[in-house]
Structures are given as structure tokens and as C-alpha cells.
Image: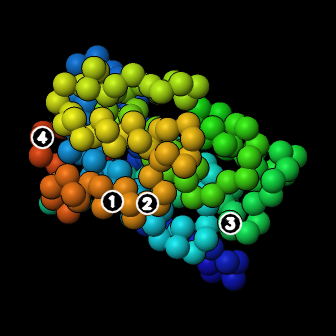
Amino acid sequence: DDKGDPYIVEEYMPCNLLDVIKASLEPNMDRLSWKDCLSIIKQVLTALDHSHSLGVIHQDLKPSNILLHRMPDQSLSLKVCDFNLAVKVEQVQDSIDDVATVAGTLDYLSPEQRAGDRLDQRSDLFNVGLIFYELLTRQKPAVASQPASVLSQNKAVPSWVDDFISTALKANREDRFQSAGEMLTFIDKANVPAKVKLQEKLSKGLVKLLIC
């Protein structure tokens, strides 16, 4: 600045994903379509694919750490933020006393985080499943057991999305998707367009919320 002090200039992002979820719970508010939710999840996975390729585990992926704005073409653009708890894979310790092992937000802890086990990128991928489930159903899944089917709560969702989330939320990480790239490939094989834009009109409240 004019005093010679350092400062950071960042892109303005008007809201985060938690804001959108909360707004959708208000009376007479529309929920995001499943295609809108998928667009968000694909961008999150792309960001994780990059960070994981560098050996970085986020450890605290949740809706409030996903910033959003609406582009002129009506597509959603996002940034994954708050890497304050992120660690390099080789820095993760086996001990439950290690702060990196137990750090995170309670509602978004993977089973291995709760158990204090050594973490890898699959812990972040579990969180992707949690977030996708919450976007589609507007409620957090029970992580202690396999959650109820998304289809039972949102009839507009294709069956392959239900399979995708079910696999992402397996308690045993060996049974889950093993990488963000694998999750993206699964989506592509389900014949989903590479870039899904907003297909349905959002409620006035959500439109205002996402205006940059």
C-alpha cells in the first residue's frame, strides 16, 4: 500500500457453498438442480486432482470452504479455499496426538480422521461425497453408517449419481474411489457433459446471492 506494507489482492467471490445451502432451506426457495450440484462437484474434484498431484491433502473440505460466483453465461465458477490445515502426504503422522491427524470439522471428518488413522487423499474424496449428498438432499448424511439413498429424497437424481455417492461414502477407504481423477472418469462415463451449466432457473433469492 502507500505506506509500504505488504497486502494480498484476491478475486472477489460473493458467497460460499454453505450460503447457498442455507438459502435453499428458506421457505419458498428452490434447491439447486442436480446438474448445478454436479457442476460444483466436478470443479471441486478438478481442484483436488491438482492439489493431490502435488501431494497436498486439504483435510477440512466443507461447503464454507468452497467460494462461488455466477458467470455471465450463467455457469457456476468456484474456488476451493482455506488450506490452513492442509498437509503434504509425507508429513501425515500415524499418531492420534498429531494435530494434522485430528484437525478438521466434526461433521465433515472421514472415518479415518475420526479414528486417528494415517490420512491420504481418499479422506478428501469422502468429503466430496458428503458435500454432494448435502447439496442434493439439503441435509448432512449420517457418517456412522451408510446414509439413506439420495434417490429416496430427491427423485430428480439419476441412479448413477446415487451409486457415485454411495461409493464415495464407503467407510472403508479401500472400497471408495481412489483418486479425484477416478471420480471424474466415472462421471464422464455416465455420459454427462464435460461442463454442465445452469439448466434451471434459480429462485430470485439464490440469483441475488450469486450475483458478483
Q: Which mark is residue 89?
A: 3
In front: label 1 or label 4? 1
Query: Circle 3 sits in a helix, a strand or a loop, which is it?
Result: helix
Q: CA distance from mark 4 to mark 3?
A: 40 Å
Q: CA distance from mark 1 to mark 3?
A: 22 Å
Three-letter residue code for mark 4: Glu
Would residue 57 be found to the left or right of residue 190 on screen? Answer: right
Q: Which mark is residue 175?
A: none
Residue identifier under label 2: 180
As drawn, 22 above or below 198: above
* Residue 169: percent from left, percent from top: 47, 38
Instruction: Count all numbered tags in the image, as a single digit.
Output: 4
Classify 10 Å Cα crowding around label 2: few (below 14), some (14-19), many (20 and above): many
- Mark positioned earlier in the residue sequence (1 or 3): 3
Please report contact status of discs 3 and 2: CB closer than 8 Å, yes or no. Answer: no
Residue identifier under label 4: 200
Q: CA distance from mark 4 to mark 2?
A: 27 Å
Classify 10 Å Cα crowding around label 1: few (below 14), some (14-19), many (20 and above): some
Three-letter residue code for mark 2: Ala
Query: Closest to the observer: 109 or 169?
Result: 169
Query: Closest to the observer: 81 or 194?
Result: 194
Q: CA distance from mark 2 to mark 1?
A: 6 Å
Residue at 37%, 56% (x, y): give it.
Answer: 183
Classify 10 Å Cα crowding around label 4: few (below 14), some (14-19), many (20 and above): few
Classify 10 Å Cα crowding around label 3: few (below 14), some (14-19), many (20 and above): some
- Mark positioned earlier in the residue sequence (4 or 3): 3
Please report contact status of discs 1 and 4: CB closer than 8 Å, yes or no. Answer: no
Please report contact status of discs 2 and 1: CB closer than 8 Å, yes or no. Answer: yes
Image quarter of the N terminus: bottom right
* Residue 165: percent from left, percent from top: 37, 39
Residue identifier under label 1: 184
- Mark positioned earlier in the residue sequence (1 or 4): 1
